[in-house]
Image (cartoon, rainbow, N blue to C red):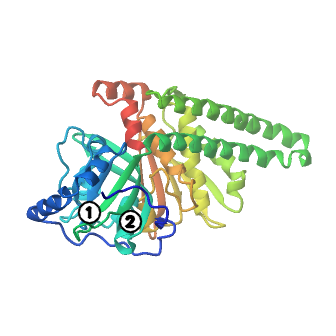
Amino acid sequence: MTCLAPNPTLNVLTRDAARSLPYLPPARRSEPAELVAQQNALATQPSLLRLVDELPVPAAVLNPQRQVVHENASLRELLRPGSVSLLGLRLGEAAGCRRATDRPSGCGTSEHCHLCGLGRSLSDLAQTGETVTGECRIAGQAGDSPVVFDLRARASRMPEPLGERFDLVVLEDISAAKRREALEQMFFHDVLNTLSGLDGYMQFWDELSDDEHRQLAPVIRRLTRQAVDEVVSQRDLSRAEAGELDVHPAPVAVGRLLEEICVAFQHGPFGEGKQVRFTLAAEDGPALSTDPVLLRRVVGNLVKNALEASAEGQTVIVRWAPESRRISVHNETVMPPHVRSQVFQRSFSTKGAGRGVGTHSVRLLTQSLRGTVDFVSAPGLGTTFRVTLPPSLIEAAETGRQQGSGVVPQLEQAL
């Protein structure tokens, strides 16, 4: 009897250990007749297939071209509910990955696939034969609805009873854990920004005159209030895990709010040696109906990221265009292509593990405000993030409900 139980002597190649390996896309696809022959070869090992079928987690047997030749019911239920078979599909295709159709050769062959944890794990396994574990995030489509999978994939070489090479991929759905982690990281990320600004003022408090105390007191009160608001906002974000995100619309003078944010960052630790400038494209228009706490977090994250990307002496420009209801945050640095392609992903960061929260939270919270966020980054232009808001959060939310797209589906798409 062939057994797939883990071998304690088997080398496990983590993604960190395999970074030096090149990414090798699958060279071709198996023809239908070849797939049938591979299925027949596996069928001679019923005990092995029964073990795959009875695994309590999603699992698939792949051929050297990364196509499914056998899968268990858990995998079908996860990636493509209601399907009878995934035969011949690659896992990204089964999940509806948006990149799987970039090239005629399918999943694993686009210019973005080398960034996919699953694709890299299978590439490393093909080159080394050693078990590889990696995490991946697949943004796909199920009919007309977007769907996002956060998965931990363990890819192993199977025994070769008939001289055929097959790989076993076992998937763990880590979406809920990633969502909780993202909410917690957003909270610590944002509240530390506020407290850092407050701490920057308090470090010099004893050295200031009474007049300076009176001038700074409103700023300190505002930062303290902001810290409290962010704790409350984190509570509301946690409630989103239960199916509904609370937002609190109020009339907001956006120009004044942006100017306050710029002043706070200019005098905080992130603004040291750099300039933060606010410009108004035209006369400030009427107040928008939006959530001021969430909007402050969105813009604050963008300004902080821009300052971190800027060199000493450079200027971050925050601009408000009332006629188009667009906020832009510009810095002079250009992002390299591999950074641009992953900007809004939850866990991606150029600053190390666990730091990829700022732009992800911007996207998540902007969608909660019923707005949109995008960016441009090019030589000679620098990098500009742009947030566009509706005139009324209440009216935009009502329109979304009438169209059947509430806040929760939008959050799921962002996550």
Where is residue 292, by image quadrant?
top right
* Of the image marks 1 and 2, the number of the one nearer the N terminus: 1
Residue, disc 1: 66
- Classify residue 254 by image quadrant: top right
In the image, is 204 to the left or to the right of 345?
right
Q: Which circle marks residue 315 in the picture?
A: none
Q: Going 28% across and 40% down the picture, which residue do you hit?
A: 77
What residue lies at 51% left-to-right and 44% top-to-bottom? Answer: 361
| Residue 253 drawn at (x, y percent) | 55, 33
For the C terminus, give its image quadrant: top left
Name the kind of residue labelled 2 in the image: Arg
Quadrant (top left/top right/bottom left/bottom right) for the N terminus: bottom left
Judging from the image, what secondary structure is the residue with disc 1 in? loop
Q: Residue at x 63, y 54 (%)?
A: 276
Query: Residue tagged by mark 2?
Result: 120
- Front-most of 376 and 25? 25
Viewer-nearest residue: 382 or 171 = 171
Spot occupied by residue 32 in the image (x, y as percentages of width and height): 10, 61
Label 1 – label 2 distance at C-alpha: 12 Å
**7 or 335, which lies in front?**
7
Residue 89, how many percent across, how many down?
20, 56
Q: Is residue 84 above or below residue 354?
A: above
Task: Please indicate whether residue 396 sits to the left or right of residue 287 in the image.
Answer: left
- Residue 10, position as x, y percentages in the image: 46, 66
Amino acid type at circle 1 is Arg
Horizontal placement of 264 versus 248: left or right? right
Q: Disc 2 on helix, strand or loop? A: helix
Does residue 377 show up?
A: no
Q: Can you see residue 167?
A: yes
Judge whether 252 appears above or below 359 on screen: above
